[in-house]
Image: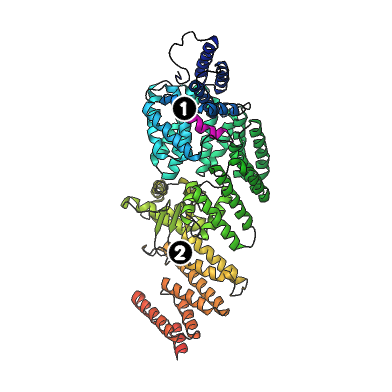
Amino acid sequence: MFPSIIVAGPRPESPRSTRDAESALADAARLLTHDEAAALAALERAYGLLAADAEAPRRLRVAATAVTALQTAWQRFDAVPRWIERLRQHAPAFDQLDPWSQARVDCALMGAGHLSDAPLLAADDVRGRLSHALDTVLDHGSRADLDELLIVGRVLLDFIEIENLADRFEPLMLLLDARRRRGQPAPLLAGRVLVHAGRCYLRFNLQQKNARYAAKLRTMWDEARALAQAHGLQTLRFDIAHAELFAAVTRGLTEQVPPLLDEMEASVDPDQPMRLAEYLMERTRGALLDGDADAALTLSADCLRAIEAAATPLRQRGPQVLARVWALTLADRLDEAIALLRERAPDLGSDTRPRRIVDCVIELLRALRLRQGADRAGYHAQLQCAFAQVRALKWPNFLISLPAQAAQLAADALEAGIEIEFVQAAVRQRGLRAPSRELRRWPWPIDVRTLGGFALQVGGQPYTSPGKAQKKPLELLRCLAAGGLRGVAADTLAAQLWPESDLVDARASLKVTLARLRKLLGEDAAIISGEGRLSLDDRLVRVDTDGFERVCDRIEAVLGRGVNSDEPSLHSLGTDLLHWYQGIFLAEEPLNPWLLGVRQRLHARFTRGVVQLGAALARGNDTATAIALLESAAVLDPLAEDLHRQLLVLLVQAGEEAGAVQAYRRLRASLSHNLGVLPSPATQAIVAHLLK
């Protein structure tokens, strides 16, 4: 086992110290499969026994093995500086090693960047070493010792995730899976590979939306959990819960967080300060998601004390420091949060990804601070700066522990036209909840359009019915959309959709159709069922009628206050009204009693809102805006005589008699073509009076 640590072959008349060193190395090889801390002690003993003039390649292999063990153990870091110094000292012997040992040293040199505040490799060198190690493992891994292959593979998976190398991931996983299934690996080593492979599948699935990756992710973590249970591996159990918690938060599944936190608590070893720090960090995240600022502040302070006890390298304290920053942000202590980041930023180097992330967080927090003031132009400029950095970092998980604040900044950015494509993709990936139901550009998981015709988008993509099989589920969706947020009684839906059936059969048909609709939408939670009613969940589903009616409510409220026409809200309300109302409710649907009532009510609110806004604008001498509003509304509703009458009056008052004549002729033609009638006597009288 672990042949690269021990130099094979007889060593004639080896001194006793050398024989003892080889014995210690053999102990280390055995211990690395299940107890890195004990293995490190054996490696320290072996290194000390090696003669000062021992061959440099051998010492380099020992140092590389120790650094890799420190990285995988991730417990304490007291011994890190001396092992990294030894690695640096003997690195010139790299070319004297066999290819497999070189791959081990490559992994150690890359890992040193995680463990030290003064990494041995520049960023470009890390990528070069990673490529070299991957090539070597793929060439020689089929013949390597299985447990050693898994140790090297686990380190490579870590860097594949960091460097986002999806194209190098699959070949490595094929090798690791094949060897693991054919052999009898140490359970802890196999479990760690499974956990890190799952993390890679998670990252690449979030980017590529690959269903196979999602299935593999679940398989990997299920296998790791089975190993942890079968062999009583509490450390592995902790790592699995930690990975699953990260996945839940990343995908917006916050309901999964509490049980995973409980599992981390049950499996954490308080004698391992770094594991304790990770647990406290995730407890802080749980408090943040619950909105409990006091608990988050207490837990994040404990977390910082834990990383001090672990002697964690400054460059690796970022997640714990950010947990404290998030707690301060939730407590509305933004100045303290920004000051803490500025204090810690120099520890992360000058041009590293962690440093760039910290700089980006500072810009996001500055945006949150500006949002509290009245300088909207300054706020939007800061948003532009912050989200340009977020996009450059390819960091959709910005403010991941503060989803409400992330959602608010995302919503404001979208409404201001800032980084629309990237922000929408981030919102979808994370499942962020919209802070308002009136947002135009928010990428709702499910978007239902009913005004001007029926259209459905699921996950940002237009839904196209595959055929007759989906007719009833879509009819049910239309009925639910018509019911609004109040919902519709289940028995009413059954009677509307199956009028020819008795109530018992109609209820059974509704149950089946409801299941089919949930499957079609891809979200069981999108439809709420309770107390004999069904409704659409407004956190997941946007229906245009809801946005439209909210604008109408705002128009009535604003005009009820008797505002002046120069108030900006009048202009924006007109724009919003025209945005939501795109035509008659479910215009292509056959007319029936329930549909007619909804259609007439929405149409009446639209025309009333346009007429009221037009009158308010005209009273304030903003006739041009009033005419533009009424002309746009007349295109959407060419049969509405009341808004046409107001348009005619305003056109004549503005001296545009020719425009008034044309508008009247369009109205008369529309009424004749669609209804076979002339304009009403009231309209004709107004025209005669205006144009005489």
Outermost residue, left side: 467
Colouring convention used in this rendered image of the protein: rainbow
Inspect the magenta stretch and tell me whether residue 116 lies in it. Answer: yes
Element marked by disc 2: helix
Q: Element under label 1?
A: helix
Q: How many marks?
A: 2
Q: Nearer the viewer, residue 532 or 688?
A: 688
Amino acid at circle 2: Val
Bounds of the magenta segment: 106-117
Residue 454: tell me if it is visible.
yes
Residue closest to the far top: 13
Q: Quadrant of residue 3?
A: top left
Q: Position of residue 314 (x, y in %)?
A: 61, 37
- In the rendered image, the vertical position of residue 403 relative to residue 223, given as above or below: below
- Which residue is labeled 1 in the image? 94
Furthest toward the front, the residue is 53
Q: Tag on residue 261?
A: none
Amino acid type for the residue under numbered disc 1: Phe
Q: Residue 598's mark?
A: 2
Mark 2 and mark 1 lie on one chain; the one further toward the N terminus is 1
- Magenta stretch: helix, strand or loop mostly: helix
Does residue 548 sit above or below 21 in this rendering?
below
